C-alpha cells in the first residue's frame, strides 16, 4: 500500500497486524523487538530431545538494566555466533526464541501481548510487566560454560 501513512517513527499503523513478516520494512522489523533481552540469554539444547533450556547467563554484550545489546550494530564483530533474526531465517530459529517473543508469536500466527511496547506505547512496559531479564542476569564471562546448567531458568 504505497499511500499508507507513516508515523513519526517511520512505521505504518499497526503494521504487525496488517502485513506478513517478509513485507515489513527494516524499521518495522526492528520495532517488533520488545526489548526483553531473553534472546541474549545463553541457552542449552538437549542433543537427544532438542529441548532448549534458557539460563540466567547473558551474552557479554547485554546491558542488564536496559535489556539491550551494548554493541547492537557491530555485535557480530564481538560475538560472531550471534544470530541475526531475519524474516527469511525465522523458521530456522523460532524454536529457541522465548515464548513471549513478538517474532515467534507473529511467525506462529498469534497476537502480541498487551505489554508489548507497540501496544502500550512505552518501552518500559516489558519491564513493568515483569517479562524482561532486567536486573537478574549473570554475565557469561563470570560463569564457566560447564557451569551454565546451574543457571537454568524456566522460559517465562
Image (cartoon, rainbow, N blue to C red):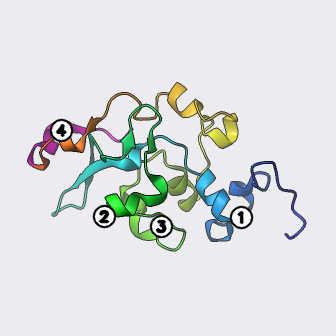
Q: CA distance from mark 3 to mark 1?
A: 16 Å
Secondary structure beneath disc 4?
Answer: helix
- Of the numbered discs 1 and 2, the one sitting upstream in the chain is 1
Residues at circles 2 and 4 in contact by the CB criterion of under 8 Å = no
| Mark 1 Cα-neighbour bin, 10 Å: few <14, some 14–19, many ≥20 | few
Which of these two is toward me, 2 or 59? Answer: 59
Q: CA distance from mark 2 to mark 3?
A: 16 Å
Disc 2 marks which residue?
81
Residue 126 in magenta? no
Residue pictured at 46% horizontal, 72% vertical: 89
Residue 28, percent across and down? 67, 58
- Of the numbered discs 3 and 1, the one sitting upstream in the chain is 1
Disc 3 marks which residue?
90
- Of the numbered discs 2 and 3, the one sitting upstream in the chain is 2
Residue 138, percent across and down? 26, 35
Disc 1 marks which residue?
19
Q: Which residues are magenta?
A: 146-156
Secondary structure beneath disc 2?
Answer: loop
Residue pictured at 54% horizontal, 34% vertical: 126
Amino acid at each position: 500500500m504505497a499511500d499508507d501513512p507513516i508515523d513519526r517513527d517511520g512505521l505504518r499503523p499497526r503494521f504487525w497486524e496488517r502485513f506478513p513478516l517478509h513485507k515489513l520494512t527494516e524499521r518495522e522489523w526492528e520495532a517488533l523487538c520488545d526489548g526483553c533481552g531473553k534472546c541474549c540469554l545463553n541457552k542449552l539444547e538437549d542433543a537427544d530431545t532438542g529441548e532448549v533450556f534458557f539460563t540466567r547467563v547473558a551474552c557479554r554484550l547485554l546491558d542488564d538494566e536496559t535489556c539491550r545489546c551494548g554493541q547492537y550494530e557491530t555485535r557480530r564483530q564481538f560475538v560472531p555466533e550471534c544470530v541475526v533474526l531475519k524474516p527469511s531465517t525465522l523458521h530456522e530459529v523460532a524454536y529457541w526464541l522465548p515464548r513471549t517473543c513478538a517474532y515467534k508469536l507473529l511467525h506462529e500466527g498469534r497476537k502480541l501481548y498487551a505489554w508489548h511496547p507497540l501496544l502500550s506505547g512505552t518501552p518500559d512496559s516489558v519491564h513493568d510487566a515483569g517479562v524482561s531479564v532486567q536486573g537478574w542476569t549473570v554475565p557469561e564471562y563470570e560463569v564457566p560454560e560447564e557451569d551454565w546448567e546451574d543457571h537454568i531458568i524456566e522460559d517465562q
